[in-house]
Every structure is written in C-alpha cells, then in structure tokens.
Image (cartoon, rainbow, N blue to C red):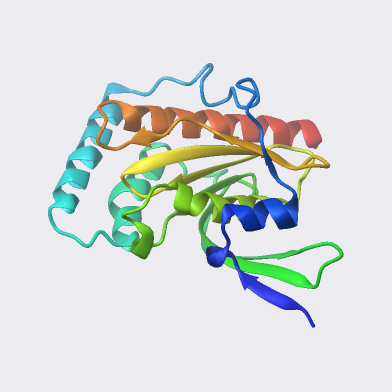
Amino acid sequence: MVQTVQAQNIDMRYVIDHFGIRFNRDENFFREWQENLPEITDSQKQYLDQVREGYFNLLEHPPLLEGVVKMAILDPILFIGGFFLSPFYIRSEQPIDIALEDQDVVVRGRIDSLVLQEQLWLMVIESKKFAFSTEEGLAQLLVYMLANPNPEQPTYGMVTTGGSFLFVKLLKTETPQYTTSRLFGTRNIGDLYEVLRILRKLTAVVRSNENHTL
C-alpha cells in the first residue's frame, strides 16, 4: 500500500533519512548569492523602503497571515523585479508529487509560487508558522526542489516569513546537496535591496543554464 505524506508535515530529519540529502558547508558551493549581483535603481530602492515601512505597519495589526505577507511584501518585490513579465511566469498553489525509489511513499504538497521553468522556487511559510524562523519551511522547500525535472542543473529557492528571507541552492547529485545564504531581515536597512538583487542574479543564472541545455 502506498503511503502519502504531506510535505508540510515533513521535517529536516525526514528529508535526510528518505532523500539522503546533505548540507554542503563549502563556502564556494553557493557563490551566486554573493558575487556579481546586479545593481538596482534608486526608484526601486525607494519602493522597497515603502515595502519595509508597510511591514512595520502590519506588525502593529496582527495576526500577519500568509496571504497578507504575499500581497504586501513578496508580491511587490516580484513586481518591481519584473518577474510578472515574460519570460517569467508564476503559478500559485502548484501541486507536487515525489515518489521515493524502492519505497511505497509519495510526498505530496503545494508550493505557493513557482517561477521560471521549475528552476527557481519561492515559498511563503504558512501563517500559523509566521512567528517561527525560515528554518520551519526549509525542509518543505527542499522537498519541492527535489521535484526539479532537470536534475543536471542546480535548483534555487527562497523561503520567506515576510520578516526574513533565506536563499537555497540544491544539486541533485548521487547524494543531493544543499546549502543556504545568510538570513536577510526586512527590519534591516538595505536587506530588501539585497533580496531583490539576489533574485535577479539567480534568475539570470537559471536562464543561462537553460540556454546551455538547449
């Protein structure tokens, strides 16, 4: 009998035991979030400053629900970054099924946003977990990234609570490996600038990798 596991109920221990994933501690494994980041304009910075002020306003009127986080924080960042324009696309609540080899287990879940050919994944932590760190959503995000249909290329992801952002890189080698960026905080002056710059850099990397495989 096939066992179905909901992705949101999976923790990091489950991902390690069932997918064999390992954390890569080599600082050179994920240089993309640190090097050669594109510049953003003064008008984009001003817009992000407004997003930051909106975040502080939301904190004064809890609860800060998942839908509000997307509408007030993530969506504006995607908008000013041009991620709603071709060749990018966003699909919300995308179902993902992953069958484990040699095991009668299917991991099933839904991801909130999917951008650019299944190579860059964005996830907002559920509202009930908002008070926790991005670590609460990391295992779930990795499960979604493991569903990447192009295993020869790196997969990138970002998980956010609205108050913090964490970028992830995954390589589906014989032993899958991942690592993360530093944590970026909406409270911190300038961190939203870096979030936008990294998103633009990762999409450029994904598009370049995609062109090389054509």
The location of residue 141, given as percent across then percent down, is 56, 52
- The structure residue drawn at horizontal position 36% and vertical position 41%, both measured from the top left corner, is 164
Reply above or below: 122 against 152.
Answer: below
The location of residue 13, given as percent across then percent down, is 62, 54
Q: Quadrant of the C terminus?
A: top right
Q: Is residue 134 left or right of residue 106?
A: left
41 and 112: which is toward the camera: 112
User: Image quarter for residue 40?
Assistant: top left
Q: Is residue 26 left or right of residue 184?
A: right
Reply above or below: 142 against 40.
Answer: below
- The structure residue drawn at horizontal position 56% and vertical position 32%, both measured from the top left corner, is 202
User: Image quarter for residue 163?
Assistant: top left
Residue 147 visible (yes or no) = no
56 and 199: which is toward the camera: 56
146 and 76: which is toward the camera: 146
- The structure residue drawn at horizontal position 37% and vertical position 59%, both measured from the top left corner, is 129
The location of residue 52, given as percent across then percent down, is 23, 39
Q: Is residue 80 left or right of residue 117?
A: left
The location of residue 140, given as percent across then percent down, is 56, 56
Residue 161 visible (yes or no) = yes
Q: Is residue 107 left or right of residue 112?
A: right
- Residue located farthest toward the bottom when viewing the structure as drawn: 1
- Residue located farthest toward the top when viewing the structure as drawn: 36
- The structure residue drawn at horizontal position 68% and vertical position 75%, both measured from the top left corner, is 4
Total numbered badges shown on the rendered structure:
0
Q: Quadrant of the N terminus?
A: bottom right
